[in-house]
Image: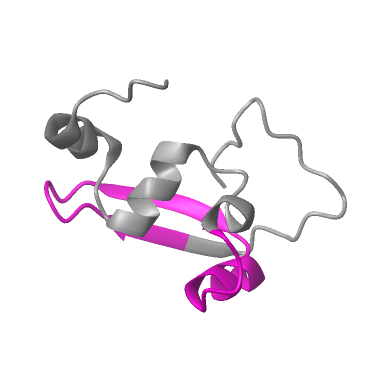
């Protein structure tokens, strides 16, 4: 299981991260692997839960990778650095 970001603290009430999710960048072919909650992934994919809530344990660039299928490197190459980071 990938390590969780240092800022994120897992609570006993959080759903289990029981779904391995593999995403391939449509631009460069790089693959990213993430563990997510199956229930929250389903809720997000059916538009019943915002992505920020469904994947709160992931960073913004990782969530964008899942959503747009553009890895963080290709995103920066295409659109430039994030001015808010």
Left or right: where does residue 9 sit relative to residue 7?
right
Estimate the x, y position of residue 84 in percent, counting from the top left. Answer: 41, 22
The number of callouts visible is 0
In the shown orientation, is residue 2 left or right of residue 82? Answer: right
Rendering colour mode: one colour
Q: Nearer the viewer, residue 23 or 66?
A: 66
| Residue at 18% from the left image edge and 38% from the top image edge | 74
Instruction: Tell me the residue at 37%/57% (across/down).
Output: 67
Which quadrant of the figure contains the C terminus? top left
Q: Residue at x 57, y 58 (%)?
A: 36
Q: Where residue 49 appears, x then y in whole percent?
A: 61, 66
**Apparent side of residue 63 relative to residue 78 in the rendered image (left or right):** right
Q: Nearer the viewer, residue 32 or 62?
A: 62
* Nearer to me, 51 or 57: 51
User: Which residues, given as a range, are shown in magenta?
Assistant: 21-50
Note whether 19 is above or below 57 in the view shown: below
Q: Residue furthest right?
A: 12
The answer to whether residue 47 is above or below residue 24 is below
Check residue 84 for magenta coloring.
Answer: no
Q: Quadrant of residue 80?
A: top left
- Residue 6 picture location, percent across and down: 64, 25
> Would residue 38 be counted in the magenta stretch?
yes
């Amino acid at each position: 299981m990938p390590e969780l970001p240092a800022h994120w603290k897992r609570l006993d009430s959080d759903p289990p991260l029981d779904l391995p999710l593999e995403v391939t960048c449509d631009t460069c072919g790089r693959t990213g692997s993430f563990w997510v909650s199956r229930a929250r992934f389903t809720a997000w994919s059916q538009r019943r839960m915002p992505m920020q809530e469904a994947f709160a344990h992931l960073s913004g660039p990782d969530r964008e990778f899942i959503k747009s299928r553009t890895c963080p490197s290709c995103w920066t190459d295409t659109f430039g650095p994030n001015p808010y980071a």
